Amino acid sequence: MPTEPSWSHLLLFDGVCNLCAGSVQFVLQHDRSGLIHFCSIQSELGSRLYREQGFDAQEPESMLFITPTGIYAKSDAALKLAETMGGQLSWLRFFRVIPRSLRDRAYLFIASNRYRFFGKKDQCWLPRPEWKARFVS
């Protein structure tokens, strides 16, 4: 688990996925506190952290959200991310009443089809200059 004080909340994401890049942009626009930082799974650090959690960095299947309280994957990562951002997204925490197996099945369906549904870039998405400080590695 990362202990770097400048990023206590780190979201690992697929940097070539259009859906993932759009999700990161959404978080950047709505996490007004600037608490959440980002790292592409394709980067050296992202790949290492992803593999340490038992995932294949060559075939990313889930974002990972690393926080001081734990490491979250799949639907748990999405819900913890929404909870951390707070505000109007806080209501999403009620999806926790749905069994994880069902939530993860829906998550994995979208994740396994994300390139087909939303497209894929040849290289990692680059953030706007004002957002660069929120990216690790």
Image (cartoon, grey):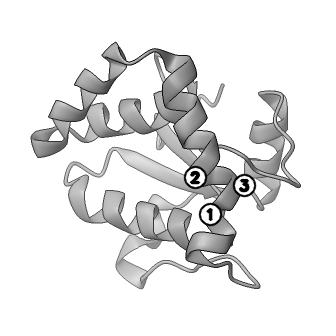
Rendering coords of residue 60 (x, y %): 76, 50
Apparent side of residue 119 relative to residue 32 in the rendered image (left or right) = right
Tell me the residue at 76%/40% (across/down): 50
Say which amino acid is labelled 3.
Ile
Q: Name the residue under label 1.
A: 114
Q: Which mark is residue 110?
A: 2
Q: Which of marks 2 and 3 is nearer the N terminus?
A: 3
Relative to 61, residue 103 above or below? above
Between residue 9 and residue 62, name the one nearer to us. Answer: 62
- Mark 2 and mark 1 in contact? Answer it, CB < 8 Å: yes
Rendering coords of residue 124 (x, y %): 68, 76
Secondary structure at badge 1 equals helix
Tell me the residue at 42%/82% (across/down): 128
Q: Earlier in the sequence, mark 1 or mark 3?
A: 3
C-alpha distance separating marks 1 and 3? 16 Å
- Mark 2 and mark 3 in contact? Answer it, CB < 8 Å: no
Task: Give the foreground label among 1 and 3.
Answer: 1
Packing grade of label 3 (10 A; few <14, some 14-19, many >=20) is many
Q: Which mark is residue 41?
A: 3
Relative to 86, residue 30 above or below? below
Secondary structure at badge 3 equals loop
Q: Quadrant of the N terminus?
A: top right
Rendering coords of residue 101 (x, y %): 57, 19
Q: Residue 131 carries which label?
A: none
Apparent side of residue 50 relative to residue 107 in the rendered image (left or right) = right
